[in-house]
């Protein structure tokens, strides 16, 4: 039992008054002349046991009445009897993640969660504090009706949100409310991927409602990417599907919805990967999607991607680079992946005169000085070191896919060292030293592209790497593709001030932070009036795995003393307030005090009535 | 009270009535009112030997009006006759300190109430030509007036009421025995007291009086607060005579007290009834006519 107004417990000290009166009554100072005092003595003598018992009983009843009133004034709440429920701080967490939009028994599961949450909110009284917390972290507080309205308007997200964070927020809200009864009521589909980690809830009561039923088999597109992001104009779409069996897919490009043009159709095997190569006629930044036939969970049947499509870059070849580079460029030109021209150069460092260029280390160490001077003149912030003839293996950063350079052997290299404020990516290393670096309109290779210095020119990855370097790193900055889940927050690239909304209308980006829209899709980034990239919003792949946690397992995800998991929405709504069985006890205590006072009155007056009756009889 | 048709004084509130005049005056009003209420003259059957005239008073039997004088002098007088076998009565009044107490300022003390009663009763008896004696006592006999039937006897009794008293004990048995000595032949004894004493000794004395043929009536005077302990709060209650002190919370003991008082009254009634004495309890808020009627009823039973 606890008290809402504990200071009033001091009133209990008044219980000492009847006690003191009882104990001190033999020390009364007031003297009254009363000739019939002998009758008082006789009355006390003849009724001493009865009087003592009666006086003790009266004293006890008076003390009890004072204590009960003091207790009632302190507004106790406890797990005893009581009416209604104690003033409760309750946070209703509604799982509105994408998975709850799954159609089960002809209706979205989310409707059942929303109905249960509504019932719980409507159980609140004016003395309660109620919040709604959703999976995307939004909080709505206020009166019961305000929260109920917010629940009514609630719709499923296009992503998973963060239920763990939502529960943590709910726990914080009720803990800070200052009310004795605190509860977090969670309505969720119990999706296993949403409840991965254990959540500490401490002494906060938690009840979880998980509708009964088995989730349907789900098909989903869990991966859709344009590779590379910059198509020249060739490129490929890589997709991966999820499902227990095969599914028909469609790859569309050039828009979203009906405006899109079908790029490819086919049948994806269960949990299989799709690779479609294409050279579409569209140019610039385009949106694409990979779609499956609709099933019970519509939200993950479409996955979006974005690509920049343009003409193949035109390059010139420095003849001093040797036959391997020349042959490779010829092959790329014949396959339309490069053109011969002057947009960029593939050139030995000592012959460098302008950028953009793929700069190759000189084959003769005596040209290193000339090479460094040429780099300095061109404004490239890297310098070649002294020739090092030792065998090493090329390693690319772990995050790079596909790895085209990884594993190549190097026997001659000129270690690259930064000069001044070198802002560049280290594309590959040999040992701890950069071997290939890339910066603004340049790529530098620290070895001659000749088998006497490295076996990279004869490896399978050389040709695609050369094409990628020429098209992606030398052909200018087309922009960037940002991938995010709905509602996610991410830093805007430098110079990006505007994001097209779902209707294509520009929306200013504030404080350099982009909030991913709630709807999946491709949203183009703008630098000035030009498109400078795309924000691709897709649901998290995990959200497509509809498998649920069994109730005991879900219960184990909460580290708390008072946690229950059930499938009865009405009971869940009630338990939100009475699960802890803490109810206000003031009214029962006042009723008890009244009963005690009535008993006291009966005892103290009952004997008087008997005496009067006796007197009447005697007079008669 | 000047008009014979005035409201009967014997039914007035005692305290209000006593505040209107001296005991002598009040006693006359009470007796006059009392006699009016009898509807017939108590003088019927008295002595037939003429003694004197007196002015007519309401309630007098019309048969005794001297019509000749009424015709001659235009005033009404009644003839009074000398008694032949007059009753000899003695009134015994307890004037101990406990009698001088009242539970409320608006009420008479028990003693004041009793003195009014004595004055009225003695006047009533003397008007009947009965011989009336008077004894006052507390811890000793304060006043002893032998019975006489003269009008002046009443004055003597009234004067005696002003004598001192308020002793710290009540020697009722001695007073009763003194009464027995004053009345040689069977007569009437009226004891007026608050009876805060042991009943056995009193009963023994009364038994002796009864043995020699006296009719004894005991008028037990109580203050209403003594009857029902209608006080409040808590205090040390002190008996002014014995000095007995008892601390008590009125609310706690009231019920038991009332039972005890009723038991005590029942004991007195039983004890005195066993001796053949009459016993009546009155509280000081009862009009004087009530105890007077009880005492007079006892007189009427006598020859």
Image (cartoon, rainbow, N blue to C red):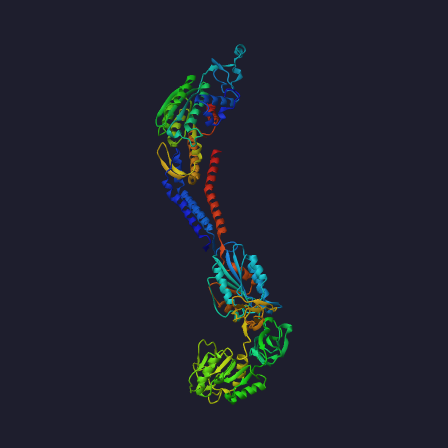
Front-lying residue, B34 or A120: A120
Decide: is B98 above or below A96: above
Decide: is A368 above or below A606: below
Decide: is A36 above or below A171: above
At which x and y percent is residue B200? Answer: 38, 32
Q: Is residue A24 visible?
A: yes
Which quadrant of the figure contains the N terminus of chain A?
Answer: bottom left
A402 sits left or right of B205 in the view = right
Front-lying residue, A13 or A543: A543
Residue A229's image quarter? bottom right
Front-lying residue, A144 or A35: A144
Q: Is residue A427 visible?
A: no
Front-lying residue, A156 or B239: A156
At which x and y percent is residue A556? Answer: 48, 68
Question: How many numbered marks appear?
Answer: 0
At which x and y percent is residue A199? Answer: 48, 67
Residue B253's image quarter? top left
At which x and y percent is residue A467? Answer: 54, 83
* Residue furthest right as drawn: A258
């Amino acid at each position: 039992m606890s008290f809402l107004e504990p200071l009033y417990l001091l009133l209990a000290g008044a219980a000492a008054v009847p006690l003191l009166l009882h104990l001190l009554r033999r020390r009364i100072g007031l003297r009254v002349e009363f000739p019939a005092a002998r009758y008082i003595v006789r009355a006390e003598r003849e009724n001493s046991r009865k009087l003592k018992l009666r006086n003790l009983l009266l004293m006890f009843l008076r003390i009890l009445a004072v204590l009960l009133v003091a207790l009632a004034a302190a507004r106790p709440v406890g797990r005893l009897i009581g009416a209604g429920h104690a003033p409760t701080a309750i946070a209703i967490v509604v799982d509105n993640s994408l998975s709850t939009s799954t159609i089960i028994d002809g209706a979205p599961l989310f409707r059942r969660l929303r109905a249960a949450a509504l019932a719980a909110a409507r159980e609140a009284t004016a003395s309660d504090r109620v919040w709604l917390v959703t999976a995307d972290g939004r909080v709505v507080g206020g009166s019961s009706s305000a929260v109920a309205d917010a629940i009514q308007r609630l719709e499923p997200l296009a992503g998973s949100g963060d239920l763990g964070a939502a529960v943590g927020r709910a726990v914080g809200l009720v803990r800070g409310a200052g009310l004795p009864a605190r509860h977090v009521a969670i309505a969720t589909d119990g999706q296993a991927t949403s409840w991965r980690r254990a959540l500490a809830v401490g002494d906060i009561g938690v009840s979880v409602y998980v509708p009964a039923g088995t989730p349907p088999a789900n098909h989903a597109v869990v991966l859709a990417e344009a590779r590379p992001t910059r198509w020249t104009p060739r490129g490929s779409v890589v997709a991966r599907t999820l499902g227990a069996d095969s599914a028909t897919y469609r790859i569309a490009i050039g828009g979203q919805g009906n405006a899109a043009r079908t790029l490819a159709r086919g049948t994806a095997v269960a949990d299989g990967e799709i690779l479609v190569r294409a050279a579409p006629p569209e140019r610039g930044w385009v949106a694409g999607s990979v779609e499956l036939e609709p099933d019970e969970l519509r939200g993950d049947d479409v996955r979006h991607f974005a690509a920049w499509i343009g003409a193949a870059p035109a390059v010139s070849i420095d003849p001093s680079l040797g036959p391997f580079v020349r042959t490779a460029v010829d092959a790329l030109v014949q396959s339309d992946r490069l053109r011969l021209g002057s947009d960029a150069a593939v050139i030995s460092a000592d012959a460098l005169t302008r950028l953009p260029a793929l700069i190759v280390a000189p084959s003769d160490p005596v040209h290193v000085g000339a090479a460094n001077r040429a780099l300095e003149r061109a404004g490239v912030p890297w310098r070649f070191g002294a020739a090092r003839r030792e065998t090493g293996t090329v390693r690319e950063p772990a995050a790079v896919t596909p790895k085209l350079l990884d594993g190549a052997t190097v026997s001659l290299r000129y270690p690259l060292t930064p000069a001044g404020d070198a802002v560049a990516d280290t594309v590959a290393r040999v040992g701890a030293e950069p071997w290939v670096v890339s910066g603004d309109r340049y790529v530098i290779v620290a070895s001659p592209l000749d088998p006497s210095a490295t076996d990279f020119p004869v490896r399978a990855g050389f040709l695609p790497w050369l094409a990628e370097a020429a098209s992606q790193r030398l052909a200018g900055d087309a922009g960037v593709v940002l991938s995010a889940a709905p509602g996610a927050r991410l830093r805007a690239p430098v110079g990006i001030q505007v994001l097209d909304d779902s209707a294509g209308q520009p929306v200013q980006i504030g404080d350099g932070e982009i909030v991913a829209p709630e709807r999946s899709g491709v949203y183009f980034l703008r630098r000035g009036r030009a498109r400078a990239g795309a924000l691709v919003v897709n649901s998290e792949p995990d959200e497509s795995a509809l498998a649920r946690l069994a109730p005991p397992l879900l219960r184990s995800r909460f580290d708390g003393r008072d946690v229950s998991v059930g499938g009865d929405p009405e009971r869940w709504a009630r338990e939100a307030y009475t699960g802890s069985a803490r109810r206000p006890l003031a009214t029962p205590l006042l009723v008890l005090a009244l009963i005690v006072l009535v008993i006291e009155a009966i005892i103290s007056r009952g004997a008087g009535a008997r005496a009067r009756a006796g007197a009447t009889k005697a007079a008669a | 009270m000047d008009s014979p048709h005035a409201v009967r004084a014997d039914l007035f509130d005692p305290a209000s009535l006593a505040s209107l005049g001296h005991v002598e005056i009040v006693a006359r009003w009470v007796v006059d009112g009392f006699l009016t209420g009898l509807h017939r003259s108590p003088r019927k059957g008295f002595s037939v030997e003429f003694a004197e005239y007196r002015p007519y008073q309401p309630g007098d039997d019309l048969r005794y009006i001297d019509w000749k004088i009424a015709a001659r002098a235009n005033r009404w007088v009644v003839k009074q006759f000398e008694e032949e076998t007059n009753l000899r009565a003695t009134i015994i009044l307890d004037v101990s300190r406990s009698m001088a107490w009242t539970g409320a300022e608006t009420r008479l003390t028990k003693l004041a109430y009793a003195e009014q009663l004595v004055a009225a009763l003695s006047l009533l008896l003397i008007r009947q030509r009965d011989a009336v004696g008077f004894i006052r006592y507390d811890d000793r006999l304060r006043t002893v007036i032998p019975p006489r039937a003269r009008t002046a006897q009443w004055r003597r009794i009234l004067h005696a009421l002003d004598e001192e008293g308020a002793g710290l004990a009540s020697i009722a048995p001695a007073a009763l025995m003194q009464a027995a000595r004053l009345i040689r032949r069977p007569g009437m004894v009226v004891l007026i007291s608050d009876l805060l004493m042991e009943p056995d000794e009193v009963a023994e004395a009364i038994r002796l009086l009864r043995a020699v043929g006296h009719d004894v009536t005991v008028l037990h005077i109580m203050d209403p607060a003594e009857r029902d302990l209608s006080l409040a709060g808590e205090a040390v209650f002190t008996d002014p005579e014995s000095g007995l002190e008892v601390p008590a919370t009125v609310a706690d003991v009231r019920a038991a007290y009332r039972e005890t008082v009723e038991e005590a009254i029942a004991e007195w009634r039983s004890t005195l009834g066993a001796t053949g004495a009459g016993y009546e309890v009155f509280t000081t808020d009862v009009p004087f006519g009530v105890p007077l009627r009880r005492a007079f009823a006892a007189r009427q039973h006598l020859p």
